[in-house]
Amino acid sequence: MPSKSAPLSLKIAVGGGLLFLYFPFTVILLYAFTTEDSAFTFPPPGLTLKWFSVALQRQDLWQALTLSLQVATVATGLALIMGTLAAIAVYRTPFFGREAISFLLLLPIALPGIVTGIALRSAINLTGIPFSFWTVVVGHATFCIVVVYNNVVARLRRTAKSQIEASMDLGADPLQTFRYIVLPNLATALLAGGMLAFALSFDEVIVTTFTAGQQSTLPIWILSQLTRPRQRPVTNVAAVFVIVITFLPILLAHRLSQDREST
Amino acid sequence: MQNIPPASARRPGFQLRRVVNFFYHRPRGLLALLLLAPLLWFGVVYLGSLGALLIQSFFHLDDFTGQVVREFTLQTYGELLSRSNGDIILRTVGMAASVTIAAAILAFPLAYYMARHAPPRLKAALSLAILLPLWSNYLVRVYSWKLILAQEGVLSWFIRLFHLEGLLNLLLSLPSIGGTSLSVSAFGPFLAFLYLWLPYMILPMQAALERVPLSLTEASADLGGRNWATFRWVILPLGFPGVVAGSIFTFSLTLGDFIVPSILGNSSLFIGQVAYIQQGTAGNIPIAAAFTVVPMIIMTFYLIGAKRLGAFDAL
């Protein structure tokens, strides 16, 4: 609802808000290049690319990154399957408790992470299952499902029922209708939901601290570096990696959903 | 257009097709099949874990053996309400409330500008600019504040540049929230929380402000209402559900966080930290469970209040 141009004071406040949101990122970026390795002096005494090559040689960092990517991939896969199943079920048939399902799926992100984390940890302890790659994945998928679910439900609501009916009228059976009408319609929603789920999993630290045993995902690695630092600038380099790896899928997911809305 | 072969011509999918057709004509069966896996996961694994946690909060830890005694008792909840634990709860709630208020104030100009002034392209760009930090790494964002607030860091540099040392010292000398430097005072976690959760406040506020009809603000101006009067009597009451909706996130997320106060701030404990420490090194699951019940109860009441204020229509 654009109206007459904004007063200057409002524009300044908006600029200030954006500065507040983005200033920290620039600080991290700057410190990845500092020559100093024990303090955070500003302005940095000098700039160097050295820490990028040091980071390349740090095995623990690369193992953590690999593990994070693996966990995020598997958790996203599970979330895609579960979220789509639930979305189709909720969309297709009205049934008793339909609202409750949306609420249930939302719980893991509505409740503080520590509640989900401690609950899962004590349950895993009670059942005697050892903490492993898979306990981390289960924890992540639990809160990733809702992202996929929300995206798919929103898309299904916008998909014209008439298309499905037309397909059936023209003699396509349910499988063909699903394959040629429903799935292509869902494709970008699945992609967008999947990317958000991936970013969510790739970032997660709170639930992971409870569901991981010896496994160290990238956020866990960063957390351990924050409390017991070893070469601080390497942490900054890792932080830059993380920013880039998460920004890209988000920008892509955003574009995909924008394109859909404009067509 | 794709050339779609007739159903009977594609033999390999024949079995699958029969299964699909079978379920297509039995929606209840299909529903059960679709929901089986998600419901097993959420109903059994997730709710089961939450339920188990709740049950364990009614057990207690034997002081002598250090073992959890599995019989029903309210002893753990008694410990929860002791003086020192009560302080922790109050401190956490106080932090959550101040972060929420600050976020509402800071979010308003952005939300208002997006809702009322920004042309469509700029608006899309702004909403992306607000979402991007929200989805990017939580830990990295906390860490950035450690860099900014470090004693020799960026903020001190700016403070020296503008000769604001006096103001800084005044803030740091405040009782119970001050400290030797910004990062080890209560301002450290406060700023980090504010930064982390600000986008959650902006987006619902913007949605609510967008629904305030332009005609109402014009009517207010026509009737002689100055900017402040229009804001106070028209925009604020109509946009308030958006503030409440955003506050659900800022409040809840601050209540449960245990990482920010362990990286920044003056080592005074928050609910999340105590729960983390108690379940881990101390092995006292009952008290950890009882501590996680606190944010759940607070949030339940908060949500009921928010619903009354119409926050859910603003989401």
Image (spheres, coloured by chain):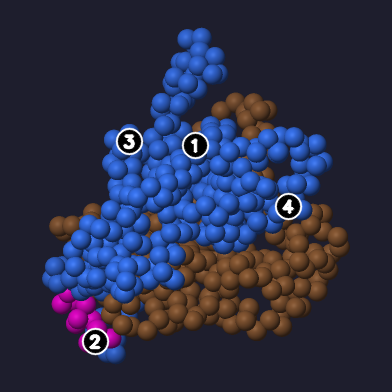
Give the foreground label among 1 and 2: 1
Q: Secondary structure at mark 2?
A: helix
The answer for how far apart the CA atoms under marks 4 and 3 are is 44 Å
Q: To which residue does mark 3 refer?
A: B310
- Between disc 2 and disc 4, the foreground one is 4
Asked whether A34 or A97 is in front, the reply is A34
Provide the residue designation for mark 1. Answer: B101
* Relative to A198, A80 lies left or right: left
**Magenta: predominant secondary structure element?**
helix
Q: Which residue does the image show at 47% across and 10% down from the upper left?
A: B223
Q: Alpha carbon of mark 1 to alpha carbon of mark 2: how far?
A: 61 Å
User: Which chain's residue wears label 4?
Assistant: B
- Amino acid type shown at disc 1: Ile
Q: Which chain is brown?
A: A
Chain in blue? Answer: B
Q: Nearer the viewer, residue B145 or A194?
A: B145
Helix, strand or loop status at disc 4: loop
Task: Give the residue at mark 4.
Answer: B151
Q: Which amino acid, mark 3? A: Gly
User: What range of the chain is rendered magenta?
Assistant: B13-24
